[in-house]
Image (spheres, rainbow, N blue to C red):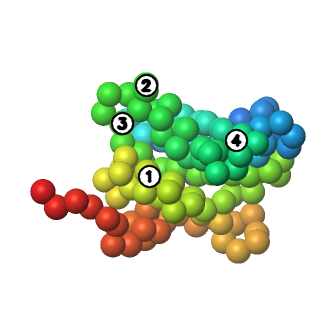
C-alpha cells in the first residue's frame, strides 16, 4: 500500500516532536522520504555550535535510505521545522542531493505561502538546468 503525502508529513512531524531540541545541537528540522520500493525513512537535522558545518535533515535521511537499500531511489520527500512541524522547502544543497538520488524524478512536498497547505512538485521544477558532467 502506497504512503500518502499526509502520512509522510506526519512521519516527519512525529520524529521532530519526539526529538525536538531548541537548545544544545538545535534539532529543529526533520525529514521523511519514501523510496520507489515503498520504504519510508526519517531523519533529523544534525547541528553543531558552528552553523556552517551542520547537516540538513534531508541529507541525513537520504543517507539512512542509502544505508538500508542497495538500489535506493527517492519517490517523495518532505522536511518540517519547529515544534509546529511547518513544511519547508529544501535548500539548494538538498535539492542537488534529492535530484541525484532520484534521477530528477522525485516528488517534493513544499509549502504554499504561510498556510498549512502544501503542493507537490518535481525536484526538476525546483532545480532547473541541473548541473551534470559530460562524459
Secondary structure category for the residue under label 4 = loop
Disc number placed over residue 72 in the picture, else none:
3
Asked whether the viewer can see residue 83, the reply is: yes
Tell me what residue is drawn at x 83 percent, y 47 percent: 83
**Disc 1 target residue:** 98
N-terminal of the pair, mark 2 or mark 1, is 2
Viewer-nearest of discs 4 and 2:
4
Q: Is residue 12 left or right of residue 94?
A: right
Q: Residue 72 at what x, y percent from top left?
A: 36, 36
Q: CA distance from mark 1 to mark 3?
A: 12 Å
N-terminal of the pair, mark 1 or mark 4, is 4
Does residue 96 sit above or below 26 in this rendering? below
Q: CA distance from mark 1 to mark 4?
A: 20 Å
**Disc 2 target residue:** 68
Q: CA distance from mark 3 to mark 2?
A: 8 Å
**Disc 4 target residue:** 47
N-terminal of the pair, mark 1 or mark 3, is 3
N-terminal of the pair, mark 3 or mark 4, is 4
Q: Residue 85 at what x, y percent from top left?
A: 76, 51
Pick out the residue farthest to the left.
Answer: 135
Give yes or no for contact between labels 3 and 2 (Cβ–Cβ under 8 Å): yes
- Say few, some or many: other residues with alpha carbon within 10 Å of mark 1 (under 14 / 14 to 19 / 20 or more): many
Secondary structure category for the residue under label 2 = helix
Does residue 122 sit above or below 74 in this rendering? below
Amino acid at each position: 500500500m502506497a504512503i500518502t503525502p499526509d502520512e509522510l508529513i506526519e512521519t516527519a512531524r512525529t520524529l521532530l516532536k519526539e526529538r525536538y531540541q531548541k537548545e544544545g545541537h538545535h534539532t529543529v528540522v526533520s525529514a521523511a522520504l519514501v523510496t520507489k520500493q515503498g520504504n519510508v525513512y526519517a531523519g533529523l537535522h544534525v547541528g553543531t555550535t558552528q552553523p556552517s558545518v551542520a547537516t540538513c535533515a534531508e541529507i541525513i535521511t537520504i543517507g539512512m535510505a542509502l544505508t538500508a537499500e542497495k538500489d535506493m531511489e527517492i519517490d517523495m520527500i518532505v522536511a518540517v521545522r519547529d515544534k509546529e512541524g511547518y513544511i519547508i522547502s529544501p535548500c539548494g544543497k538538498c535539492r542537488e542531493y534529492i535530484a541525484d538520488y532520484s534521477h530528477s524524478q522525485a516528488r517534493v512536498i513544499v509549502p504554499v505561502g504561510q498556510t498549512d497547505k502544501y503542493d507537490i512538485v518535481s525536484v526538476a521544477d525546483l532545480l532547473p538546468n541541473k548541473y551534470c558532467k559530460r562524459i
